[in-house]
Amino acid sequence: MNAENCSLAEKIVSSSYVQQGAQARRARENLVRQLFEQKKCPEIGWDDMSIELLLQELAVMDSNNFPGNCGVGEREARIASRLVANRHYNIGHGIGRSGDITAIQPKAAGSSLLNKLTNSMVLDIIKTAGVQSAASAFVVPMATGMSLVLCMLTLKQQRPDARYVLWPRIDQKSCFKSMVTAGFKPIVIENKLEGDELRTDISAIELKVQELGAKNILCVMTTTSCFAPRVPDRIEEVAQLCAKLEVPHLINNAYGVQSSKCMHLIQQGSRIGRIDAFVQSTDKNFMVPVGGSVIAGFDKKFIEEIGKAYPGRASGTPSMDLFITLLSLGVKGYQQLLKERKEMYKYLSAELTKCAEAHGETLLHIPHNPISMAMSLRTIPSELATQLGSMLFTRFVSGTRVVATGEVKTVQGYTFHGFGSHTDNYPCTYLTAAGSVGMTKNDVDLFVKRLHKVLERCKKTGAAETLVEDTIET
Amino acid sequence: MNAENCSLAEKIVSSSYVQQGAQARRARENLVRQLFEQKKCPEIGWDDMSIELLLQELAVMDSNNFPGNCGVGEREARIASRLVANRHYNIGHGIGRSGDITAIQPKAAGSSLLNKLTNSMVLDIIKTAGVQSAASAFVVPMATGMSLVLCMLTLKQQRPDARYVLWPRIDQKSCFKSMVTAGFKPIVIENKLEGDELRTDISAIELKVQELGAKNILCVMTTTSCFAPRVPDRIEEVAQLCAKLEVPHLINNAYGVQSSKCMHLIQQGSRIGRIDAFVQSTDKNFMVPVGGSVIAGFDKKFIEEIGKAYPGRASGTPSMDLFITLLSLGVKGYQQLLKERKEMYKYLSAELTKCAEAHGETLLHIPHNPISMAMSLRTIPSELATQLGSMLFTRFVSGTRVVATGEVKTVQGYTFHGFGSHTDNYPCTYLTAAGSVGMTKNDVDLFVKRLHKVLERCKKTGAAETLVEDTIET
Amino acid sequence: MNAENCSLAEKIVSSSYVQQGAQARRARENLVRQLFEQKKCPEIGWDDMSIELLLQELAVMDSNNFPGNCGVGEREARIASRLVANRHYNIGHGIGRSGDITAIQPKAAGSSLLNKLTNSMVLDIIKTAGVQSAASAFVVPMATGMSLVLCMLTLKQQRPDARYVLWPRIDQKSCFKSMVTAGFKPIVIENKLEGDELRTDISAIELKVQELGAKNILCVMTTTSCFAPRVPDRIEEVAQLCAKLEVPHLINNAYGVQSSKCMHLIQQGSRIGRIDAFVQSTDKNFMVPVGGSVIAGFDKKFIEEIGKAYPGRASGTPSMDLFITLLSLGVKGYQQLLKERKEMYKYLSAELTKCAEAHGETLLHIPHNPISMAMSLRTIPSELATQLGSMLFTRFVSGTRVVATGEVKTVQGYTFHGFGSHTDNYPCTYLTAAGSVGMTKNDVDLFVKRLHKVLERCKKTGAAETLVEDTIET
Amino acid sequence: MNAENCSLAEKIVSSSYVQQGAQARRARENLVRQLFEQKKCPEIGWDDMSIELLLQELAVMDSNNFPGNCGVGEREARIASRLVANRHYNIGHGIGRSGDITAIQPKAAGSSLLNKLTNSMVLDIIKTAGVQSAASAFVVPMATGMSLVLCMLTLKQQRPDARYVLWPRIDQKSCFKSMVTAGFKPIVIENKLEGDELRTDISAIELKVQELGAKNILCVMTTTSCFAPRVPDRIEEVAQLCAKLEVPHLINNAYGVQSSKCMHLIQQGSRIGRIDAFVQSTDKNFMVPVGGSVIAGFDKKFIEEIGKAYPGRASGTPSMDLFITLLSLGVKGYQQLLKERKEMYKYLSAELTKCAEAHGETLLHIPHNPISMAMSLRTIPSELATQLGSMLFTRFVSGTRVVATGEVKTVQGYTFHGFGSHTDNYPCTYLTAAGSVGMTKNDVDLFVKRLHKVLERCKKTGAAETLVEDTIET
């Protein structure tokens, strides 16, 4: 309520009460002021009322909500269904312009503010989470894999002759597909088994670059967050190598923002070597619905190039979800979530160790993976083991993966032995579980209890049901 | 409420009233039954209550909403903010799997149903709107331009040697950028001026194919919906040519679903020639917020290939928006919108003709463009003309474009003369306006009234304000 | 967004776009300004976005939403469930204070504004609808009947000896109960049959006053809107009589605001005679959920007395519903609704006449009732006739009443012959239907079609189902 | 989704995933089943999704939401504004019928279920909270004071000669007004000062009954929850006296449900004496917006009589708010709230004691009041003391009351000396604060901190501001 309307209100109800109300209102406006001034995620999260007030203020600034506006273009953000309008807070213009997905839109000052502020806040959070030198970041409404495609296509414009991507193996389909879809030939760098862990083979990368020629290589694509027993790539060494050999370096940091270890690797890599961009999922790191990723990097100009490579306007939903979530959590709230995640990871690890021991199994020793862990399934016949995932899923446990040795799978024409285990022949069958952001103690307790029952059942009956055919998601 | 709970309810309030209520409920369940059986957009639109009931039913079937579920994966669709959860009806898993954006998700039966049904309904609507032979369609949460990139990258896998895209010129940035981003060299086919219209130069295309060699050409990319004075490409002839020369044919049908003429061209082209895929925007055709497009085609298998090329899960928001909107409108409702659009196009055309004549201008004669029209600005000095758009925008008219002759612009390294007018040297400066879906009589009346005033002002003062620097969006 | 925040926004996105947005915002603030200045229902209804913005602004001014507020009272408008908070827009303090239901609340400037403005707007609408001399009105969250109780209890304080209420008979339970609950002895004034109509017996009232003594009579309670074949009371004559005899006059105008005839009677009565207060339902006249009524009158002071008689704070929901609805409709929108109602009344009348004639019945001639009409059921055996209502209800026709002659009912210890028909022995059994605000042509068509079928069935089979025991609501 | 639709869904997405979803759905249906079977507040609170699903199911059962329904009555629950419809979940018929506010409505099976279940749950909670013998309870959408009016008017029908209500003094306006509005003469029974406490004078009551004659007395109206230094009445002794003298006994238990002591008094009183009804506010006890109260008692038939005395249908909002809140909290959640309240009461008491001592004041010794406490203000000049409330309010402390000695106030024609302090001449000026349900540690800390500052300021300057004229609400 502006000053004039407040004055009028004072004639309707008592002046002092209105002034008190106006003072309370100013407290909320100050939150907005700070946000606009600092363009950072607020320390303390906002309440929902303040967030919704700002969203409505922004909506009011978009042309489709102008009273008396007449639209004679081909795209006027008209919304047919009020249910749809409601869920978007009447914001309809999406983000970006045909020339640049991070550009401001003349017709949509509110949407543009939302977009700019979200990118700014997410950069702030990435710095806070450990990559202090990050120079630029933006939210793009595409899966991590498709965002990697966009990064590669942008690199391609600088390296027109490049045909290969060097890729320390990680058995996750969309990651692999991203290289193929982008039109490149993936060169698989097999991992090295060190103890129970699968780790990057640095010298194999170097050899490959020499063999193929640096200018024929678009980039090395490494991975941080991944399923055990693989561990984050040796980002620092790869970054040094890339700097030395003048090969770009792209990082798939899908759910790595939640882990200080992953973020530290990237920060260190950028300090001592070369990292062109790193990409992370919004849903996996920030507890929003699936739909977006954040492309970030250390060279503002190159990140801008990627933004400019996206042809057309795009969905503003992942940005709005992140905008709301970051305002709601605040830096403190997000740090608290990360702290709890770390505790849950430890708790899950401890409980799973007990469960493993009770069944003659072991929790594999994978100290370098800060999120995912794996428990051996040596005592269970492999035909039973592969059904464990389904059995757990029908018991309302989601997210476990059982990986049996010897699986052969063809992805986009490439054949992988031992697919799922990141190596041709891992020593044993195992089951993975992850300590991810948002996990609760209750999740862990229920999981371990149900796992225990299922393992017992497997041993007793020697048979398992097959209610769900496929619960292994990659 | 299931039968058991209804029986219990009959013990609390009178049995006959509960039965009456239950009967009313069954009427709503029948709507769902028909939808599931036919997988088509319903003839008559649903009321919001029925839509929300179904959305909640679907949400209940996703694992993140299972009571007692425990999630131990890295991606469990946890949602931190309740505002975010609300706007997504608690649906968080997005669409697709890492292997295929149209695949069903084990963890999310509800989301998967929503996705499948939306794709099925949208195919139905595309058929109803005129492309009866369409065999497959799916919603992808990307701009039309980015979706064209995906189509080109998929084609590339079949034509590894292809380096060129033949492109009858249309001065719209994202369209041009899509070819460059996908890694191809655009070959511009200049339009031919026929009367006031700019039309496809068929023989120039044929010559270029012969010159470059069919196998080096990824595809011809034509456009239907476009700004006047350009008109939809001669789709039928291009399709015949592509069939003959064995060159793929991609159509940018951005806002063409709303026009029976555009749709008819595609249908005819497919009947007598070759069309590999046609892409349309969801916001421009279906009045949903910006964010998605529909990729459709006549060969089910090829369209599936495109779906499989997208690496990763993606935002379900454009699908959900379309799901709600199509259920809400029904076939009848959408046809009514299209009918009204046609009438508004005629009305706008008539009113603009009057306005033009009153100011010594003409409405250019562009009969082949069913959506966009252009009025000459011959009597106004060009330095003034270019400010008309801004002047109109500050008067709350959005969507007009003024295109002056002689503009030179460089896009992605390519230089265009007369950029905006689709030709190097269009005979006059002009202003465009479109009769798009959702436009109302009030929009037209306000626009013409304000245009009239602005034109008068231009003539009187010989000067114009410059409040807004750039309101021409492309 | 205040000026400071707008300035900051201009540093984030282009200044001119922000200014355009700010200008659009001012258009909405002007709506609020006009409302606060004029305190009248706006001529043109507001869009939902403007209404919700204002509701949020008001919520922000209530102490339970003050950031940093600490509450140490026994009533701090804390809301446990967010679903509940949402549906009240976080407004929780209700209306009024312990001393006065129309008083402003120190803790709740926003709620107080909402309450004051609603009362002010509703007075405006009552004037517009025909009672131009109305001096005061307020919304009270009670049924019409309970509000009549409050009026009577307030009158009682001025007339401590009064024991009787004179009541021209209307067979509607809550009306009768209101007198008994308020502690008075109802004196029934039987209606006179004039043609098919039942009308007020003025001389019987006068005789009763003389018989009982004016000072022993609390008031005469008349009724405007009522079921045919009764018609609105002769308000003018009763008002004159009350003025002459110095007896207060209370009017039950339950759903009379929607009828210019009812409102005209009240206006005329007040001009030439005495009316102390008239009470109307919010749901029946303004299409809001059941829950409130409006107490209005011509003596500001007396209406204030009634407000002061309500002990305690009360629900703000009926006020908020009316606030939203009146802002949304505007004067024009409400007048349009009333116009359509009048047309529907005529249409229903015409269609029902046809239906009646087709079945050998007549539409009773009741020209003085502007809302309700009745069709004779002379050709149908009475045991069947009474089941017609149920039969219609199971066919999804709600709101009809079948009244058979000879019904005897005891209400609060008083025995009524011919209950339902407003007289001891109406000449025939009949069915009523009403042309109420919000009724559509589709309602009429469906009703007449179903009635036709049911009447046919009655005649054919000579039997009826009894699915619903009681659908006659009074 | 019913079985048929599930089967159809299995043809669209994988059968096993649909079955898993259906199983999850059944878990939610079971919650409904238990609710319908037991008609009790669930032990464990429901999640919002389950609550909203049930609300929608109920809405579907009301005639205004029947697809194809045609309404031809005068009241069809049509809702003009979608904002209003949304906030009521499309439920519009209110509660009750003209004959009985607790009756079921033929047109509204869903609303009726909601109403019945709420009354049933609230009775359960009252029992759980300490009044195990309560036999009946219902929610009425009126303030506690107005509900007391309804109780008195119902008693009046049994005691037509009664003219007096005996009332142990409590200085709260709506309570006093309820007797006057109901048409009775309040007989004030002054409290006795015992230590710092003000307690019921039992023998004064007995003397008054003898003096006025039992049959002339409508009832004794006692109070449990009240501002210190008054304490809950000696309910047990009054109840015994009422039983002996055959005088009805009404209890104002406004915010007493939250205190086991108040509830225990009522339970004991009913066991050894007479209590006809006890009334409590919904907002003060259950953290819902202002608007309703619960009328409860030990004689089912008498409570029903009260329900039947309300003339007309009434707002369903307080019932819906309570329905949602009780489902959301569950018995456990509510008990947890009560437990925390008790702790906060102790904490507030301890902190206030420290603060008092630091300023040379004392926390008055009022052990019998379980909610409200008072701190002396002996060292501050009374003209300053009275401004303390305003000073605190402008510092965002709401809910304190400063009561100075010597205040004389006339309420409804009755003059009270020392108004606010429940006695003519309390020994000192004091400030009250309450430990109410929902209070947080933060509330206490902020309050004590701000009080401390204000007291310091008072002493230093010897002067105070007067920003807010009146913040003492009663």
Image (cartoon, coloured by chain):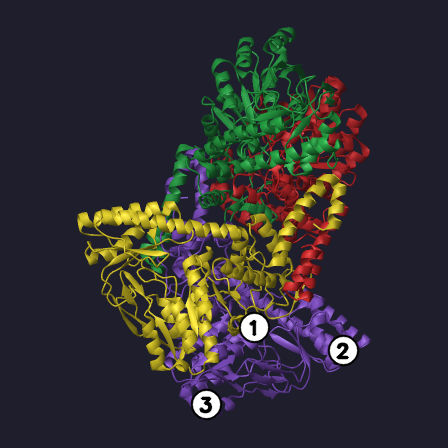
Chain colours: A yellow, B purple, C red, D green
Q: Where is residue A130 in the image (x, y as percent from the top left)?
A: 47, 59
Callout 3: helix, strand or loop? helix
Indicate whether D350 appears above or below A182: above
Chain for disc number 1: A
Give the position of the C terminus of chain B as an image quadrant. Answer: bottom right
Are marks 2 and 3 in one subunit?
yes
Crowd band around label 1 with a 10 angstrom C-alpha radius: few (<14), some (14–19), many (20+):
many
Q: Which mark is residue B359?
A: 2
Q: Do labels 1 and 2 share a chain?
A: no
Q: Which residue is more in the foreground, B248 or A104?
A: A104
Q: Mark 1 points at which residue?
A: A98
Classify B457 as above or below D260. Answer: below
Tell me, yes or no, whether dots 3 and 1 are on the same chain.
no
Q: What element carries label 1?
A: loop
Is B165 left or right of B336, judged from the image as shown? left
Q: Nearer the viewer, mark 2 or mark 3?
A: 3
Q: What residue type is labelled 2?
A: His
Q: Which quadrant holds residue D9? A: bottom left
Residue wearing tag 3 = B209
